[in-house]
Image: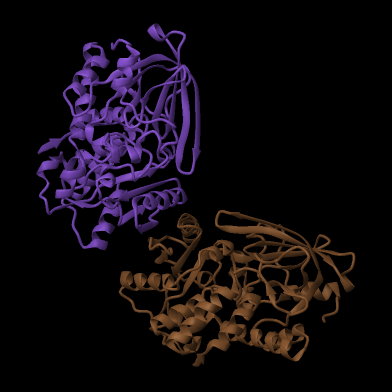
Chain colours: A brown, B purple
Amino acid sequence: MRWIDEEDIEDLAIGAALLGTGGGGDPYLGKLMVQKCIRDNGPIQMIDVTEVPDAAWVIPTAMMGAPTIMMEKIPNGDEALKSMRMLEKQTGISAYATMPIECGGLNSTVPFVVASKAGIPLVDGDGMGRAFPELQMETFHIYGISGTPMVLHNERGDRVLLETLDNYMLEHISRGIAVRMGGAAHVAEYMMTGADVKRTAIHGTMTLCMALGQSIRHAQKTKRNPIEAIQEVTRNSIYGEAIVVFRGKVTDIERQSTDGFVRGKALVAGLGEYEEKELKVDFQNENLFATVDGQAIAMVPDLITFLDQETGMPITTESIKYGFRVICLAIPTPDIMRTPEALEVWGPRYFGYDTDYEPVEIIQQRRGTQHV
Amino acid sequence: MRWIDEEDIEDLAIGAALLGTGGGGDPYLGKLMVQKCIRDNGPIQMIDVTEVPDAAWVIPTAMMGAPTIMMEKIPNGDEALKSMRMLEKQTGISAYATMPIECGGLNSTVPFVVASKAGIPLVDGDGMGRAFPELQMETFHIYGISGTPMVLHNERGDRVLLETLDNYMLEHISRGIAVRMGGAAHVAEYMMTGADVKRTAIHGTMTLCMALGQSIRHAQKTKRNPIEAIQEVTRNSIYGEAIVVFRGKVTDIERQSTDGFVRGKALVAGLGEYEEKELKVDFQNENLFATVDGQAIAMVPDLITFLDQETGMPITTESIKYGFRVICLAIPTPDIMRTPEALEVWGPRYFGYDTDYEPVEIIQQRRGTQHV
């Protein structure tokens, strides 16, 4: 158990944006929302996955929709709580705690707002270990939890209770609802017992986000190399050590909002040891697949994140621009995210790439490129 | 109060397809579903709007989606009942009766299936007095009833409870859900008290459908002109007397399924007194606007229906084909459908036509064309 204060949230927002692999929404907005809650209600209680009683119920909360649209419709912070309350009323089950469904600027912070307003703990873990574009892309789903009953609210107060036979239909119908609700919705879903949380969640990801954010901020203050700081933190986590896979200057960004997603690609011309090479990163809300001169160098579910070359700060797909000097960082995902069941749900083939998943650290060994 | 038997349903299906103005789904399919219910459970009780106790609750039931898609996914008949049951459970209110929301091949018959399976009466009335493509196009909406809480089911068993702040958002979100549920959904909506039914429903439309269907069938048997039979029935109803506005041969049909609707137009080359003239009828599920050589001759909310020239049988927008010889019939709508509030919701301007509503009988007087 740990009490989370405003400074922890400063760190959380940065680290979650890093694990968010370009998606998961604007970290600045989410941070401000939680910090206001902490000023109003005091520090927020965060508990380990192992601290949730087996028979207690956890109701994860989140936003869904295109991050670019979320930024235009600033939530008042009560919507996800209302979704959780409606789910409690529908099921007759009270939430012992809430939990993030993913790591990302917005969706790591939304559940802190809910925890603060409801006066309940937040569970230190999530179901993606990063951000992913679709709602069945959850260890919760992969290891047998139903995403529904699910509740969606928009900022006007329109609301929906959704029950589907499987989590693919959950994604399909709820995505359509979020689009028609105005592009974004505030949701409560994947409610499960403490026993199931222990079995299916990726443990400790909020603590990891905070450690990453703290290390980046500390590196900035002490003029230390932020990449080394990130590598140090990841080395001692359930993730693999972060790997620099490219450095360069952004030369082109293609970005389209369709069907509730932001899809596109970023092109980066290499600098330094990557001179004369070109990196291409495809994204669907999140960065999915990176190639250098046509050769795959990192792919889902491994994390692919752009960092500002100077500050080491993560850059989201909605804010990356022509001319940015960036480091492309890859982080090997934990084992729970690389099982055959998991790769079926979020491996490269699901996203339409005609290739089997190859772990980034293996590719990197082959490339023989030196780490920084 | 009246008991409805298999033969009544034979008539109902024909009359409802006529009032359905080309939309509202296949009359054949709906008819078979109700007739099977009557064979299983006996005749169905139909009550007048005035017979519903003021404090009793009526829950209308229906299908929504593109009629062409509905025909490909034959419902088992339990889905709309399940939607009504879920709405009852959600609200703690039992349905005293069910009711159609519109006249049309499918949506006039679906509530009979629900009434039969639930063992409750069906109320003789509806909220459109015809078929319309959108769910806020209801006298219920126009005169102040909320369409939500609403429940949608698909044939798989996926289901949604929807609550919106207004009936336009109800239409917008539920349409998206129906599309993602597979193109069609089975719904319960616009629940209201008997007092509100009396105030807002269009009275006696099921009886009118049956009388129309009976008159067409009787005309066929006795070799009488079916148009005259239809005119006789409409003359003695809350609708105006049916008017023949065109006769001819279908020369072109344009039809597209988009956003859960079937949109398009039919072109008809005139025959007899309409020789050398061309009729164009635009539709969005239902026939909306008819012009002859560019001059408006009938428009929403007045009813525009194609009949087979030989048999007098109504033809839906999904079954009309090149080469059909047709009569285009228009029926003036009742006063409750022509108030300023009503025309705001379903007048020609709502559908994008830059013209004020002009009643078909007034246009017809100006045209000076003789009735048959």
Whether A335 is drawn above or below A284: the answer is below
Percent position of residue B257, x then y: 49, 38
Percent position of residue B37, x then y: 23, 41
Q: Residue at position x 42%, y 66% from top?
A: A148
Percent position of residue A137, x then y: 56, 67
The quarter of the rendered structure image containing the C terminus of chain B is: top left
Whether B99 is drawn above or below B6: the answer is below
Residue closest to the eye, A302 or A263: A263
Q: In which quarter of the image is residue B108?
A: top left
Residue closest to the eye, A254 or A366: A254
Q: In which quarter of the image is residue B218?
A: top left
Examine the rendering and report whether any part of residue B77 can be seen.
Answer: yes
Q: Residue at position x 64%, y 78% from top?
A: A335
The quarter of the rendered structure image containing the N terminus of chain B is: top left
Q: Residue at position x 71%, y 84% from top?
A: A230
State the count of labels. Answer: 0
Percent position of residue A167, x then y: 48, 63
Instruction: Judge left or right: residue A250 versus residue B57.
Output: right
Whether B321 is drawn above or below B153: the answer is above
Q: Residue at position x 37%, y 29% from top?
A: B22
